[in-house]
Image (cartoon, grey):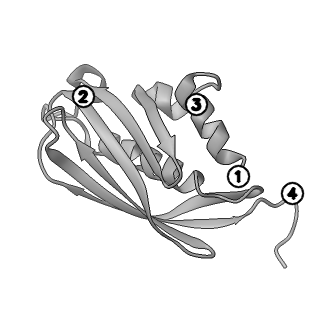
Amino acid sequence: MSETLPFLRRLVSGEAPLPAIAHTLGFRICAVDVGEARLELDADLARHGNPLGHVHGGVLADLADAAMGMACASTLATGHSFITIELKMSFMSVVRAGRLRAVGRVVRSGRTITHVECDILDAADALVARASSSCLCQPIRAPGARES
């Protein structure tokens, strides 16, 4: 098993410190399993609002990217990392406030590219946004190492 999944589960349990972006946006990591991650955000306009009185789309994109990234990371082999190389976001409805749930899941894992998706649901389980992403997965190289 990868070292990454146990680390992600320590984030869920509070045994490891949350990443800075979780503090910045205010989301919680609720569950991580192989190929899936669930995050929650209590959205409010004072913290997440745009000038039109909606939750900013970038906040939803960040939430989705975090959920998809954790889902991807949960599948990595030891000594590997990833980078998001493409992100697409579709917004289904306006969000003004309330609890949002982001469910990221791996759709397909290849040798170097992993495809992930995320649904963001409101408190009534209505779909408010859907994202998809491609992640480039590679072995971690030592600092200064050159590609062969």
Q: According to the image, label 1 marks what residue?
A: 2
Q: Give the distance between the C-alpha atoms of the residues marked 3 and 4, in whole angstroms.
A: 25 Å
Q: Position of residue 58 (x, y in %)?
A: 32, 44
User: Badge 4 is on which residue?
Assistant: 142
Q: Which of these two is toward me, 94 or 132?
A: 132
Q: Residue at x 65, y 26 (%)?
A: 16
Q: Nearer the viewer, mark 1 or mark 4?
A: 1
Which tag, 2 or 1, sits closer to the chain's start?
Answer: 1
Asked whether the residues under the numbered discs 3 and 4 touch, taking CB atoms below 8 Å apart as contact, a structural biologist would say no
Q: CA distance from mark 1 to mark 4?
A: 19 Å
Q: Which mark is residue 11?
A: 3
Label 3, label 2: how far apart the Cα atoms are: 20 Å
Q: Is residue 20 above or below residue 106?
A: above
Q: Nearer the viewer, residue 94 or 52?
A: 94
Identity of the residue drawn at 49% across and 55% down = 35
- Can you tell which quarter of the image residue 15 is in? top right
User: Circles 3 and 1: CB distance less than 8 Å?
Assistant: no
Residue type at numbered disc 4: Ala
* Residue 142, percent from left and from top: 86, 57
User: SS at mark 1?
Assistant: loop
Whichever of labels 3 and 1 marks the residue nearer the N terminus, that label is: 1
Label 2: element kind: strand
Q: Amino acid at mark 2?
A: Arg
Q: Nearer the viewer, mark 2 or mark 4?
A: 2
Q: Report which residue position mark 2 lands on.
A: 99
